[in-house]
Image (spheres, helix red, strand yellow):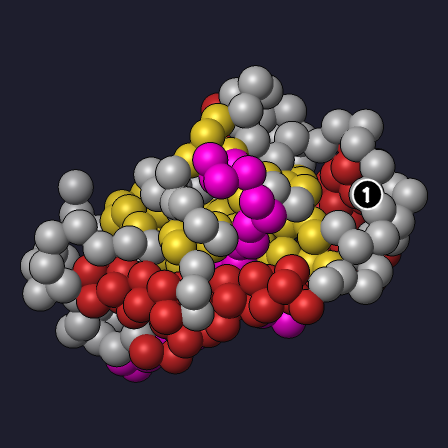
Amino acid sequence: MAIAIRKPDEIAKLRAAGKIVGLTLQHLQNLVKPGMTLKEIDTLGEAYIREKGAIPSFKGLYGFTGSVCTSLNEVCIHGVPDDTIVQEGDILGLDIGTKLDGYFGDAAITMAVGTVSEEDYALIECSKGALYHAIDSIREGMRFKELTKLLEDYITEAGYVPLRDYCGHGIGTKPHDEPNIPNYLEGKPNQGPKIKNGMVFCLEPMVCQKSGQPVLLEDQWSVISDDGLKSSHYEHQVAVVDGKAVILTEV
């Protein structure tokens, strides 16, 4: 399947959807505190998205029950909001999707709940740093596999490993579209499709400590590493404009 090239008016719509994602993540980051449940955090996120005029696109997507993926400590991605209480020293991944005027936004952060250990802070900073390093490196004409290698090299050079079997993705009038963008390289970096102006996609480094082998939990959504250790996840949605990446989900 061909990778969509978006016109400026489409990118504007994707930016509008993405801005609400960024605002919601900022809103939740300011509100989350020890003693809250994951369901309470999800409810706050959904209410804010709707208040801004968008639809929480994760709700009901592929059968997901929440509006916000709440990935606590060992859970790297797709954590289901439930009655678990967040505590001082936890790290919490928040992944949010919106739909506005037929176009989708998608981004994620991993945040500290209160004060966390130096080790947990470094873990969070790795996923965030890998994301911004990759975004800053994007140029028209480079291959997506080169981008994948940049993500993998950043993660491994920091002493961590990328989660396997899950990846970044294209986005537009569908929440997930071509291309798939893993955080680990298969094949050679000089293979595969090239990045072009007008392409819009999500990069999302998912960082584990010792093993990148994923384990799906009983809820059939939450994904952890088989090392059983804490993990982190960051994501932004970007558009390629004038040969460089512009972040659509940053506020």
Decide if residue 172 is on the left or right side of residue 227. left
The magenta region covers 224-251
Label 1 crowd bin: few (<14), some (14–19), many (20+), radius 10 Å: many
**Residue 164: percent from left, percent from top:** 35, 43
Residue 237 inside the magenta-drawn segment:
yes
Choose top left, top right, bottom left or bottom right for residue 45: top right
**What quarter of the picture does the C terminus occupy?**
bottom right
Residue 95 appears in the figure: no
Measured along the vertical axis of the image, is residue 182 above or below residue 124? above
Decide if residue 143 is on the left or right side of residue 244. left
Residue 161 inside the magenta-drawn segment:
no
Residue under the image location 10 percent in, 59 percent down: 188
Spot the residue most to the right. 35
**Residue 23: percent from left, percent from top:** 69, 61
**What quarter of the picture does the N terminus occupy?**
top left
Residue under the image location 64 percent in, 24 percent down: 65
Spot the residue most to the top. 218
Measured along the vertical axis of the image, is residue 140 above or below residue 34? below
Decide if residue 99 is on the left or right side of residue 26. left
Q: Amino acid at mark 1?
A: Val
**Residue 217: percent from left, percent from top:** 54, 24
Under circle 1, the secondary element is loop
Of residues 240 and 228, the one nearer the viewer is: 228
**Residue 13: percent from left, percent from top:** 49, 58
Residue 48 appears in the figure: yes
Counting every numbered tag in the picture gives: 1
Pointer 1 residue: 86
Residue under the image location 8 percent in, 65 percent down: 190
